[in-house]
Amino acid sequence: MYVIKVKGIAKIPDYVQLRDDKFTLLAYFRVDRPDKSLDKLGLADKLPYIMDIVKDLPFGQIAKLDI
């Protein structure tokens, strides 16, 4: 699974994309509101791990998650 942090502009907030190994979009959520999206994917228990990586990830870069 891959994570990408997208920088928002003006009134559009920052977002996070979660993608699978084929780079298919699995989730797209605001950085400050990940709960519902991760819960739908069954990754609610991985929330601290994912958000810790997102916090340190520069905008526009892709990071591989080991989940």
Image: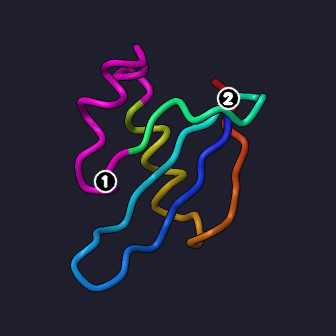
Label 2 packing within 10 angstroms: few (<14), some (14-19), many (20+) = some
Q: Residue at x 60, y 46 (%)?
A: 3
Q: In this rendering, is residue 63 above or below 38?
A: below
Earlier-in-chain disc, 1 versus 2? 2
What is the span of residues highlighted in magenta in the rendered image? 29-46
Q: Nearer the viewer, residue 67 or 6?
A: 6
Magenta run includes residue 49: no
Residue type at mark 2 is Asp
Q: In this rendering, is residue 50 above or below 26?
A: below
Q: Residue at x 28, y 72 (%)?
A: 12
User: Where is residue 20 drawn, in percent x and y?
Assistant: 67, 29
Q: Nearer the viewer, residue 47 or 28?
A: 28
Q: Which residue is mark 1?
A: 30
Secondary structure, mark 1, is: strand
Q: In this rendering, is residue 61 above or below 46?
A: below
Q: Which residue is mark 2?
A: 20
Q: Quadrant of the N terminus?
A: top right
Disc 1 and disc 2: Cα gap in Å?
18 Å
Q: Residue at x 57, y 35 (%)?
A: 25
User: Where is residue 28 drawn, in percent x and y?
Assistant: 42, 43
